[in-house]
Image (spheres, rainbow, N blue to C red):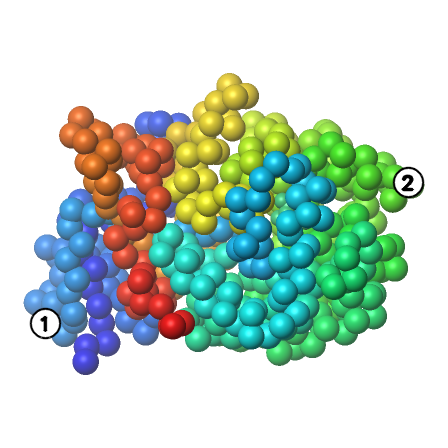
Amino acid sequence: MNDKTILRGRLLSFRREPENADDTAAFSYIEDGALVMAGGMILSVGAYADLGSDVRQAASIIDHRPHLILPGFIDAHLHFPQMHAVASWGAQLMEWLNTYTFPQEARFAELAHAERMAGWFLDQLVSQGTTTVAAYCSVHSTSATALFQAAMQRNYRLIAGKALMDRNAPDAVLDTPQLGYDETRSLIARWHGQGRIDYAITPRFAITSTPEQMETVAALIAEHPDCYVQTHLNENHYEIELTLSLYPKARDYLDIYEAYGMLGPKSLFGHSIHMNQRERAAMAASGSVAVFCPTSNLFLGSGLFDEAAMKSASVRTAIATDIGGGTDYSMLRTLDEAYKVLQLQNQKLDPYRAFYWLTLGNARALSKQAEIGTLEVGTEADVVVLNSAATPQMAMRMETVTSLREELFVLQTFGDDRAIAETYVSGKAAKNRSLTS
Ligand code: GUN
Ligand code: ZN
């Protein structure tokens, strides 16, 4: 068995955020490239013609021509226990949570259910070309344990945590300040830093946590400064009104989180739609990340993420599916909807920037650019292979495509899991190789 694998194809990897449609210096593109992987890492990258014959002979070569080879996609916000809540009809946020979502999350108290769903969840993400996620688990410790175990089994890069919630939801999905604190501490001790796992301290949102629970969140963050923090912010008008009524002293929604020490460069704020200038400035000053979830924002009728305002305020941003408020596991479908959300505000999502966002952009938002998000030597071998002519409509449209930028836009507009020819997780081909029965 060779321990080296060479992927041959068109290699595309970003160096920085593209500034405009002509900014080809922002990325590296090698028409006939060779990516050499060993031990789960990228060992070398360059033109196929420059590979020494000794390297060729000592490796297995997988020829992916004419496909594109990119770093694996990164999804910065989604909910593991909501797979049976996706595609639930007719409700906006609070009604959707109460009617469809909390009952599904309640089922994750049972370890066997959580384990079955964890395998399915990661297999689905891999089939979509997604190789890193920041995920919410249910309130139950079992759900986090099942997901961490499934990630270890697959050597999958995962940021996740059990939700903390002690009010305004059915008893079956509530903890208490003490229980949530104790369980989070023991999950961090057991899993944070194991394999490719990071723990995210996960107060669901201010509505489902009492001030007493928020005090425990502040303590957990102070005790574990290297963990992530994830929550929801300014998603829906009624949610905002209810939140402010529960925390009447707060200047605005973000101020609640600020008061409990929750802002910072490893803090991820899902949605961040209806923001005021003060909130944007506080996010920027603390290096906090606003996570854009376009399919969810449209499906739940929540509102339009103002990316231009975030940019001009220098807020760091990420993009995500938000399964199950979101309607598709595919980051390509997510880009398509993001494009339309921005169009509605007369903003643009250039294809170079779109693919930067899915890879290096989200890696930076997660402070993981040294590990993932590029095809650079010494980073982890999480790779996606894209077939731009995967379906009849894509193949037909590709007949008139004459540039890489146009090709990326075809992928961004039409692409889904059928366009994912292969996904490599830690250097191993993993698409359609389920570990679950
Ligand atoms: N706010 C609090 N919980 C959730 C959730 O599960 N999904 C979405 N979209 N928003 C939330
Ligand atoms: Zn969410």
* The N terminus, quarter of image: bottom left
Q: Which one is nearer the viewer's eye here, 328 or 338? A: 328
At mark 2, the secondary structure is loop
Q: Which mark is residue 248?
A: 2
Residue 127, image quadrant: bottom left
Q: Residue at x 62, y 66 (%)?
A: 108
Tell me if residue 317 comes above or below residue 154 in the rendering: above
Q: Residue at x 67, y 57 (%)?
A: 103
Asked whether mark 2 and ligand 1 are closer than 8 Å, the reply comes as no
Q: Residues within 10 Å of mark 2 (few under 14, many from 20)?
A: few
Rendering coords of residue 54 (x, y %): 10, 71
**Which residue in the rendered view is the most extreme toward the top?**
346
Left or right of 62 in this view: 202 = right
Front position among marks 2 and 1: 2
Q: Residue at x 54, y 48 (%)?
A: 86
Residue picked out by circle 1: 57
Q: Which one is nearer the viewer's eye here, 139 or 27? A: 139
Q: Residues within 10 Å of mark 1 (few under 14, many from 20)?
A: few
Rendering coords of residue 149 (x, y %): 52, 75
At mark 1, the secondary structure is helix
Give, as a three-letter code, the residue at label 1.
Answer: Gln
Q: Is residue 322 visible?
A: no
Q: Residue at x 33, y 36 (%)?
A: 414
Left or right of 128 in this view: 196 = right
Q: Which mark is residue 33?
A: none
Rendering coords of residue 417 (x, y %): 34, 49
Tell me if residue 183 comes above or below residue 418 in the rendering: below
